[in-house]
Image (cartoon, helix red, strand yellow):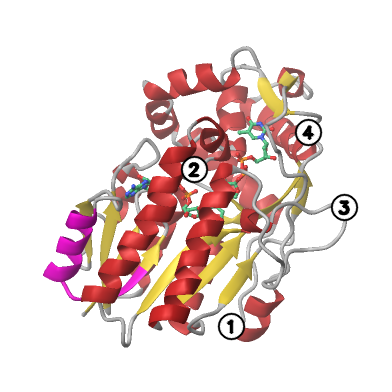
Amino acid sequence: MKNIVITGGAGFIGSHVVRRFVTLHPEFHIINVDALTYAGNLENLKDIETASNYEFVKLDITDAEAVNKLFSDKKIHGVIHLAAESHVDRSITNPIDFVMTNVVGTVILMNAFKTYGDAENGRFYHVSTDEVYGTLGDDGKFTESTPYDPNSPYSASKASSDHFVRAYHETYKLPIVISNCSNNYGSHQFPEKLIPLMIHNIKHNKPLPVYGKGENIRDWLWVEDHARAIEMIYLNGKNGETYNIGGNNEWRNIDLVKKLCEIMDRKLGREAGTSAQLITYVTDRKGHDFRYAIDASKLENELGWSPTVAFDQGFDKTIDWYLENEVWLERVTSGAYSDYYQSMYSNR
Ligand code: NAD
Ligand code: TDX
């Protein structure tokens, strides 16, 4: 059986990727490597934690000694690297954590894979973001050849790690692939991100903090479609290549929040228009990118991927998941979350 390390498997996207590989690929032994930061939660993987081809290792990827020990103890065939500090607002207040995990952690992992892993036949897959390309105006889409132009400390750290991954391919012939994906939505997303944060606030009748005028545009992709793209790229992508992944599903933030309010009113049995009254325009995010949009035709044409879930359907399922998983939502929003919320949103 081939050992595959998936980093960040206790987080939002990582838990979907781990579940997919554990259930669909008995030929792989999946080692979920995660430091369990505020964003990591093993409850996200309760349903598969006893599977015979699954193992969890608590480890911080910035700890080179521990990473080297793991890779020298077990022959690692491949790495799917998702562990990261992932929230733009946190990167604005604390950029150093982003440099450490996203840049230094990625290089430490690649060094371990290069030295001890199956760097001949295996693969190092770096999961990245469309934010490395910077921001778009009203028209156009990011392609794989769009020049990097990151604007936030988060996107600068992801761009930097992408560059290191490409450099390891050029310099050491490390077999790598990279993908750059747009905004994901779905179950198990930490409620610092727009959609679960708004769902939580609507439920509790709290103000809905829309940054600036709410006119910024994001492209939203069903997280399972991202996980399926990652699976296809890991198995069939070409070494040294980058693949863009997107939902072809652009929304202005304010329109998305209004749609969410309408659906929540129906689901919570509230009079139409009740939740929208909670919308509050707050000071804009510093350096807020205006628009992201992805041209995913390379992935579609070369590997036959396309999104499978229509937004209306996926959005409805997502809202139901947060309403049905009240214990999950209340647990992750207790304790440190209220301090975070206070520091980010009071006086805004
Ligand atoms: P997340 O914040 O939900 O999860 C990150 C995970 O990484 C957590 O489980 C956390 O415990 C772990 N982690 C953090 N620092 C670590 C460290 N030093 N050592 C080991 N583990 C550590 O993130 P997410 O939204 O699931 O994103 C996963 C990856 O996908 C990231 O690389 C992100 O840049 C990328 N991405 C995210 C989106 C999105 O919309 N969320 C879109 C495109 C790309
Ligand atoms: O309270 C809020 N109010 C608001 O108006 C929050 C949290 C966000 N926003 C806006 C900012 C963005 O324009 O909503 C949009 C989405 O914000 P986030 O959910 O924070 O996502 P974004 O900044 O677009 O980045 C996400 O997509 C790309 C992920 O967090 C990244 O990890 C991923 O790489």
Residue shown at 34% from the left, 42% from the top: 41
Task: State how far apart marks 2 and 4 are (Cα).
Answer: 21 Å
Dot 2: element: loop
Q: Amino acid at mark 3?
A: Asp
In primary-sequence order, the first of circles 4 and 3 is: 3
- State which tag comes first along the sequence, 1 or 3: 3
User: Residue visible at 57% across and 31% down?
Assistant: 197
**Do labels 2 and 3 touch, CB within 8 Å?**
no
Residue 27 shows in this picture: yes
**Which comes sooner in the sequence, label 2 or label 3?**
3
Q: Quadrant of residue 248?
A: bottom right
Residue located beneath label 2 in the image: 189
Q: Which residue is mark 3?
A: 138
> Which residue corresponds to mark 1?
303
- Label drawn at residue 214: 4
For the residues bearing labels 1 and 2, Cβ distance under 8 angstroms: no
What residue do we see at 50% from left, 76% from top?
A: 233
Amino acid type of the residue tagged 1 in the rendering: Leu
Side of 42 where 251 appears, left or right: right
Classify residue 235 by image quadrant: bottom left
Q: CA distance from mark 4 to mark 1?
A: 35 Å
The quadrant of the image that shows the N terminus is bottom left
Marks 2 and 3, how far apart in space? Answer: 28 Å
Find the magenta span and give its range.
64-79
* 249 is within the stretch colored magenta: no
